[in-house]
Image (cartoon, grey):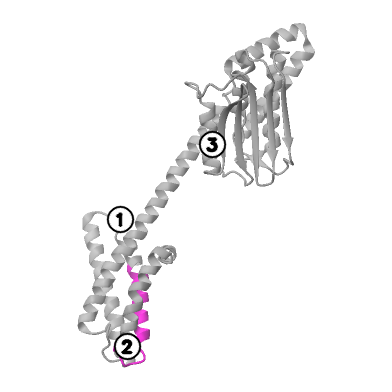
Amino acid sequence: MSAGLFSDTLAALRAPRRLIPILLVSAPLVAAQASLSRDPLAAPIGVLMCATFALVAPYLWRRWMPLGTWPEKLVRLAAYGAAGGAIVGLLGLALPRLLGVGTTFLTGRESLTVSLALFWVGGWGLGRDIELERTLERERARADALAREAERAHLLAIRAHLDPHFLFNTLNAIAEWCREDGAVAEEAILRLSSMLRTILAGVHLAAWPLARELDLCRDLFELHRIRDPGRFSASIAVDGEPAGFTVPPLILLPLAENAIKHGPAAGHRGPVEIRAAIDGERCTVLITNPGPYRGPRPGGEGVSTVERRLALAYGGAASLALEEVEGATRATLTLPARAPQESV
């Protein structure tokens, strides 16, 4: 016997949706066997027959029937039928004779025919049901793996998600600053280097501290302020203790980029703010930028990327909402305290 397949079949049979019908069929048979047969061993034989049928028949079906060509299936079907006949004959004829038990309710000639039919049909029904369930589980796992692979591709793409126009302008500005203001150029290079190093590290992680994510957003804001000093103010604050609270890497970066792109970079005056509140059970992050919320923008991928990543990492336990609040745009990200599922 394949111990792994038998153990898996046994575990599947313990599921209430299978165990209850098995008991509902077996209990009356055993009760009838005990009440209609005078021998005290009749009831144990009935229990043994029902238990063996329920355990062995679906296992044999799963072991022999699912795979192969039709000629092979016919041979396996014959083997399955012969095995059923052998088991019914052993338990219903040979064992009672060996124990000196006379004819009982389940071991009579007509009853053995019914028992054989129950073995064949019950094994087919249970085995096929278990196999279909396992196939569905494998397909779901495969779909989940494909979704996570797609998520990994999204993470890899995030390395280049920084607005190329902004990045090139920053590099050009650094080239100018190298001639005019070496200190500013050095600050910009260090800030840009730190930011890119953090992004590259985050791509290969399943989760990292919230504090590191906020530091990355802070670097992004500072880079924009170096390029365009005086255009906007930015602040990041945390209410609560962030230590130990982890988030999917780069989950806030697209939202922080959008806050700059559709706020100060679009000509709206006002502060850009990130506020994180941790209450032990969850973390709520508010990202606010000047300018009214105009709804989903054609071609925009930042918000949809964040939503897909939240679904993969937390199922339905995390949420993202965008709204207009007093003429400003606010993104509200709600994350549970549990660590995100591994997605890369």
Span colored in magenta = 36-57
For the residues marked 1 and 3, what is the alpha-carbon distance in whole angstroms? 37 Å
For the residues marked 1 and 2, what is the alpha-carbon distance in whole angstroms? 43 Å
Give amino acid for label 3: Arg
Q: Is residue 263 above or below residue 339?
A: above
List the residue tagged with mark 1: 67
SS category of the residue bearing label 3: helix
* Residue 126 is at least partly visible in this image: yes
Residue 214's x, y, as percent?
Answer: 69, 32
List the residue tagged with mark 2: 35
Q: Check residue 6 for magenta coloring.
A: no
Near mark 2 (Cα within 10 A), the count class, few <14, some 14-19 or many ≥20, is some
Front in this rendered view, residue 276 or 177:
276
Q: Quadrant of the N terminus?
A: bottom left
Q: Quadrant of residue 121?
A: bottom left
Residue mark closest to the camera, 1 vs 3: 3
